[in-house]
Amino acid sequence: MANEYANNTTMRSPLGRVRGLGSAKGGTHHWWMQRVTSIALLPLTIWFALSAASLAGASYETTVAWIGRPWNAVLLLATIGLSFHHTAAGVQVIIEDYANQEWVKMGGILAVKAICVLLALASALAVLRIAV
């Protein structure tokens, strides 16, 4: 049995022997999600900045009417969701990199995620109350 195991490990490539080992585990997925949300946020942020600039000096009623338009409400909700997801993921990386104790890491990550979820829900609720 030991000889069979030894032959199996020598027949495998170095990458095959270490696959699934190490501390990174789901790091690739996390990295990709950061890139995907960044790419999605680029046009949304440009749209939002231009829209906000065009609404500068507009009345409250005009701004509420603008938010109430279906297309604007959908884009605002997408911007809110992606922004808070991207923020939570980015701050999680910072906490993982700089927190030394495991309980600080876990507590910090949970706190950041909870805050981001609550703020995203409050923001989405504000948009939906106006749009509906």
Image: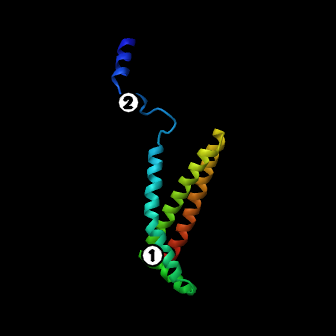
Q: Residue furthest front?
A: 14
Can residue 1 be seen at all in this image of the molecule?
A: no
The residue depicted at 44 percent of the width and 79 percent of the height is: 69
Label 2, residues with CA under 10 Å away: few <14, some 14-19, many ≥20: few
Which of the labelled discs sits on residue 16, or is there none? Answer: 2
Residue lying at the far left of the rendered structure: 11
- Vertical placement of residue 96 versus 17, above or below: below
Q: Nearer the viewer, residue 82 or 46?
A: 46
* Mark closer to the observer (1, 2): 2
Query: What's the residue at 63%, 45% (across, down)?
Result: 98
Color theme of the render:
rainbow
Q: Amino acid type of disc 1?
A: Asn
Residue at 42% across, 76% down: 70
Q: Is residue 26 visible?
A: yes
Disc 1 crowd, CA 10 A, few/some/many (<14, 14-19, 20+) = some
Image coordinates for residue 32, horizontal then vertical, percent: 44, 51
The residue depicted at 63 percent of the width and 39 percent of the height is 102
Task: Tell me the distance, in whole angstroms, between the alpha carbons under discs 1 and 2.
Answer: 49 Å
Which of the labelled discs sits on residue 72, or is there none? 1
Q: Earlier in the sequence, mark 1 or mark 2?
A: 2
Q: Quadrant of residue 61?
A: bottom right
Q: Amino acid at mark 2?
A: Gly
Q: Which numbered tag is attached to residue 22?
A: none
Q: Secondary structure at mark 2?
A: helix
Q: Quadrant of the N terminus?
A: top left
Foreground residue, 82 or 54? Answer: 54
Number of marks present in the image shown: 2
Between 29 and 126, the one nearer to me in the picture? 29
Q: Secondary structure at mark 1?
A: helix
- Residue 126 at what x, y percent from top left? 55, 71
Does 31 sit above or below residue 76? above
Q: Position of residue 42 (x, y in %)?
A: 46, 66
